[in-house]
Structure formats: structure tokens, C-alpha cells
Image (cartoon, rainbow, N blue to C red):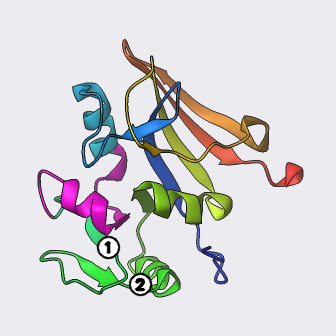
Amino acid sequence: MFENKNKIEYSLIAGVPDNWVIGNGLKIPWYIPEDFQLFKKKTLNSVVIMGQTTWDSLPIKPLPKRINIVLNRNLIKNKGAETFQDMEKAFKFAKNQNKKIFVIGGASIYNQTIKNATYLYISHIKGTFEGNVFFPKFKKKDYEIIETQEFDKFTFCKYKKNNKNL
């Protein structure tokens, strides 16, 4: 579990359908160009932190105009990305970039970081999908919705942690 001892502000960003599935193997089980465009818009000129499996699944590596950080146990070097075994060191490096920090997956990284995230950027994908990778369930009462955008196939919500409930 990521303790966030340095109180670094960061956000999680994900597309999450009604059944919380975010992946089927290395694939996102839906194709919604508007959601990908929104992800790009929100994360441009920021730091993105991901696990090795998420990195491996990217069609373009590294994600352009972002500082890419990959977490893996084996310290496999990833061309175009900073690689760390230790999450505390990865977040400390990210903070030193003086940019917004986004955790972009996968499930293991989300599970380890959701507790201390200041913001959740969630595209609530309409419907359910087949898959074996899930976003961690969170209690909406612990967050305040500070931004909403309606799209044909999803609703985007930006949540801010409501510290008085925690």
C-alpha cells in the first residue's frame, strides 16, 4: 500500500463502466474516441504514473507531451519512461517535476493509490463489459463532484476527496 508520507497531491484517471471492469487482458473493452480525447486533454503536460502492464498495453509509447513513469518489480527499463520499483520514490520524482500527477492504471496501482488520491477523474462508461481487470470500488459519499460533463456514451465526473468524511 502506498502511504504517501510526503502528502503529494495526485489524481486517478480512468474509464469505469457500470460493472467496474477496466480491462480484458491487455485491452480496454470499449472503444470510445471521445473518452480517449478527454483523457489526452486532461493529462497533457502532466506526469502519468502506471504499472508495467499498462505501459505494455499502450499503443504509443511514451505518451507524448507527458512525463511517463512506470512502476515494476523487476526494474525493466522502458524507453521514454522513468522506471521505479518503489512507489514512494516514483511519487517523489513526480512531485519534483512541478506538474499535475495522474495515476493511469492498472488495477494494482489504482488499488494501492486510491486511498490517498486528492481527485478522481472518472469517465462513467454506460453499460457493462466483459473483462478480468477491475477499478477499485469507492464510496461516492467520501467525495464531492466538482465537475461533470455529459457525453453520448459516458458521463465524466471529477471527484474531490471530502476529508470531513474520512
The residue under the point 67% across, 83% down is 5
Specify the quadrant that holds the N terminus: bottom right
Name the image quarter holding residue 166.
bottom right
Are discs 2 and 1 less than 8 Å apart at CB?
A: yes
- Total numbered labels: 2
Residue 150 x %, y %: 46, 17
Check disc 1 and report the residue beneath it.
Answer: 69
Q: Is residue 113 above or below residue 57?
A: below
The residue under the point 37% across, 16% down is 153
Check disc 2 and report the residue beneath it.
Answer: 93
Q: Is residue 166 left or right of residue 87?
A: right
Q: Earlier in the sequence, mark 2 or mark 1?
A: 1
Is 101 within the magenta?
no
Residue 129 x %, y %: 39, 25
Name the image quarter holding residue 72.
bottom left
The residue under the point 48% across, 61% down is 108
Label 2: element kind: helix
Label 1: element kind: strand
Q: Is residue 72 left or right of residue 100?
A: left
> Identity of the amino acid at label 1?
Ile
Label 2: few (<14), some (14–19) or many (≥20) C-alpha neighbours in 10 Å? some
Instruction: Tell me which segment is drawn in magenta.
Output: 42-61
> Identity of the amino acid at label 2?
Phe
Residue 106 x %, y %: 40, 56
The residue under the point 50% across, 38% down is 122
Residue 56 x %, y %: 20, 61
Give the foreground label among 2 and 1.
1
Q: Is residue 31 left or right of residue 147?
A: left
Report the Cα–Cα distance between label 2 and label 1: 9 Å
